[in-house]
């Protein structure tokens, strides 16, 4: 997978792209990152990339030329997905991460402070993505979030492939609680069932605890799921258990 990033602040990416899973994925040849300053594609001597808005008003607007030239330079003959990071974009989620992870080439456009000339949105960009209902100073951090979540889905990027499949959101449920040694810490015990060695019971316990966590924290996710008869039964138990606890 090829990932190009167009930004006015390329230095923001160096630590993130070279560390941990992303750094290893690049070393293994699973992904290739290229970060470009789109100021280098400005047609003006001074490297101007923005200008005042037509119609007046405050703030600056990113000009179309530098970004069109930058995308055309990195895209070559191919037609990559060209992703504009902005708060007005579609809300990002795991499904979109999975979709983008199938692409061969992604180009991210990160603006800072300013708005974009509308022709960038209409004629250059294929996707507009928001990572949440809040405003960042620029698209860089948002692009890093998307890149991280897409690269970790590439085959071979994670040491343990099952970890991506069992993720929260891939299964549609939040993850069950995890424990490691010691079996008792400051008087707090690991649930007996996890020490029992009974594999089938452990699988069931984990699924039920995933359901409990999702029921308690993200009931909206449950509405989107097709539950098995067994899961429906557990959910009833969870509701009863919650009622009992609320009474205490
Ligand atoms: N740029 C500024 N805020 C953003 C957000 N919430 N998501 C994506 N890009 C952004």
Image: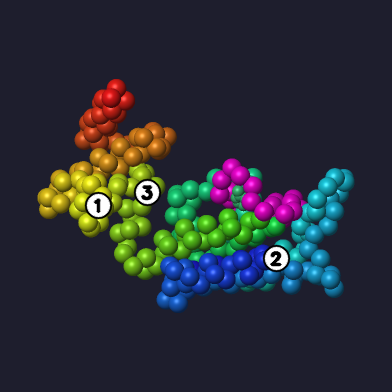
Residue drawn 85% across and 53% down? 52
Frontmost of labels 1 and 3 is 1
Looking at the image, residue 37 lies above or below residue 140:
below
Circle 2 residue: 8
- In what quadrant of the picture does the C terminus appear? top left
Circle 3 residue: 168
Task: Give the distance between the C-alpha atoms of the residues marked 2 and 3, in whole angstroms.
Answer: 34 Å
Q: Check whether the beta carbons of the residues at disc 2 and disc 1 lie within 8 A of each other.
A: no
Residue drawn 65% across and 59% down? 110
Q: Is residue 67 magenta?
A: no
Residues rendered magenta in the picture: 113-137
**Seen in the image, is 223 located left or right of residue 80?**
left
Looking at the image, residue 149 lies above or below residue 55:
below
Disc 2 within 8 angstroms of ligand 1 (CB): no
**Seen in the image, is 58 located left or right of residue 22?**
right
Counting from the top left corner in percent of width and height, residue 6 is at 65, 65
Task: Give the distance between the C-alpha atoms of the residues marked 2 and 1, in whole angstroms.
Answer: 49 Å
Asked which quadrant contains residue 160, the reply is bottom left
Looking at the image, residue 234 lies above or below residue 158:
above
Local secondary structure at mark 2: loop
Counting from the top left corner in percent of width and height, residue 91 is at 55, 45
Task: Give the distance between the C-alpha atoms of the residues marked 1 and 3, in whole angstroms.
Answer: 26 Å
Circle 1 residue: 185
**Seen in the image, is 229 located left or right of residue 124?**
left
Which badge, 1 or 3, is on the more N-terminal residue? 3
Local secondary structure at mark 3: loop
């Amino acid at each position: 997978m090829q990932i190009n990033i167009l930004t006015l602040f390329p230095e923001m990416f160096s630590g993130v792209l070279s560390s941990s899973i992303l750094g290893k994925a690049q070393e293994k040849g699973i992904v290739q990152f290229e970060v470009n300053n789109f100021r280098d594609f400005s047609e003006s001597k001074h490297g101007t990339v923005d200008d005042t808005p037509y119609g007046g008003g405050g703030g600056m607007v990113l000009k179309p030329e530098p970004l069109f030239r930058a995308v055309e330079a990195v895209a070559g003959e191919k037609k990559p997905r060209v992703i504009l990071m902005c708060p007005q974009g579609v809300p990002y989620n795991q499904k979109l991460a999975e979709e983008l992870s199938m692409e061969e080439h992604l180009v991210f456009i990160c603006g800072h402070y300013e708005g974009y000339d509308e022709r960038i949105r209409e004629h250059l960009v294929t996707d507009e993505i928001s990572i949440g209902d809040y405003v960042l100073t620029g698209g860089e951090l948002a692009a890093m979030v998307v890149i991280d979540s897409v690269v970790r889905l590439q085959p071979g990027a994670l040491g343990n492939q099952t970890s991506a499949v069992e993720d929260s959101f891939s299964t549609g449920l939040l993850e069950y609680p995890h424990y490691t040694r010691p079996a008792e810490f400051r008087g707090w015990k690991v649930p007996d069932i996890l020490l029992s060695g009974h594999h089938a019971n452990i699988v069931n316990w984990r699924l039920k605890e995933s359901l409990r966590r999702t029921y308690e924290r993200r009931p909206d996710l449950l509405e989107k799921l097709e539950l098995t008869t067994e899961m429906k039964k557990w959910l009833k138990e969870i509701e009863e258990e919650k009622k009992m606890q609320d009474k205490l």
